[in-house]
Image: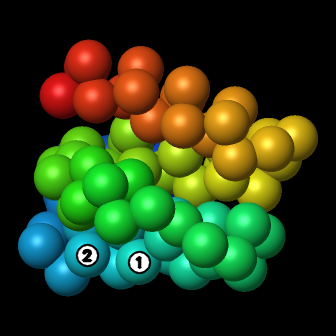
Amino acid sequence: MNNLTNSENLSNSTPEKLEKARANVIKILQTRFKDVPEQVIQDINLLDDLLILEKLFNNSIIVADFEDFQNNLEKAMLKK
């Protein structure tokens, strides 16, 4: 059994994990909202913090509308 905590897992982020996390966020957005602006995709692809990407993934599932997601993405970009 793996005893790594979630934060330890996130600290071991590899380029592959980051790319998968980015792709997951984008896929959820495209599934929920159909048309995702290219700028939003570019902004997500600039993020290199797995913890932020994980939060955005969760957020992409629960937000009421795309505007709410964009607001959260803008906040995440400021932390970058």
Asked if residue 69 can be seen in this view, the reply is yes
Q: Is residue 10 above or below residue 38?
A: above
Please identify the quadrant where the N terminus is shown.
bottom right
Under tag 2, what secondary structure? Answer: helix
* Disc sitting over residue 43 in the figure: none
| Neighbour tally class for label 1: few under 14, some 14-19, many 20 plus, Cα within 10 Å | some
| Neighbour tally class for label 2: few under 14, some 14-19, many 20 plus, Cα within 10 Å | some
Relative placement, left or right, of 25 versus 34 is left
Please identify the quadrant where the C terminus is shown.
top left
Q: Is residue 5 above or below residue 29?
A: above
The image quadrant of residue 57 is bottom right
Residue under the image location 45 percent in, 62 percent down = 37
Under tag 1, what secondary structure? Answer: helix
Residue 51: image location, x then y, percent: 38, 42
Residue 61: image location, x then y, percent: 76, 56
- Number of on-image labels: 2
Residue under the image location 53 percent in, 46 percent down = 56
Residue labelled with disc 1: 23
Residue under the image location 61 percent in, 72 percent down = 35
Q: As rendered, which of 12 and 23 lies closer to the eye?
A: 23
Q: As rendered, which of 72 and 52 lies closer to the eye?
A: 72
Relative placement, left or right, of 42 versus 35 is left
**What's the CA distance linking mark 1 and mark 2?**
6 Å
Dots 1 and 2: beta carbons under 8 Å?
yes
Asked if residue 55 can be seen in this view, the reply is no
Amino acid type, mark 2: Glu
Q: As rendered, which of 41 and 35 lies closer to the eye?
A: 35
Q: Residue furthest right?
A: 64
Amino acid type, mark 1: Ala
Residue labelled with disc 2: 19
Q: Is residue 63 above or below residue 42?
A: above
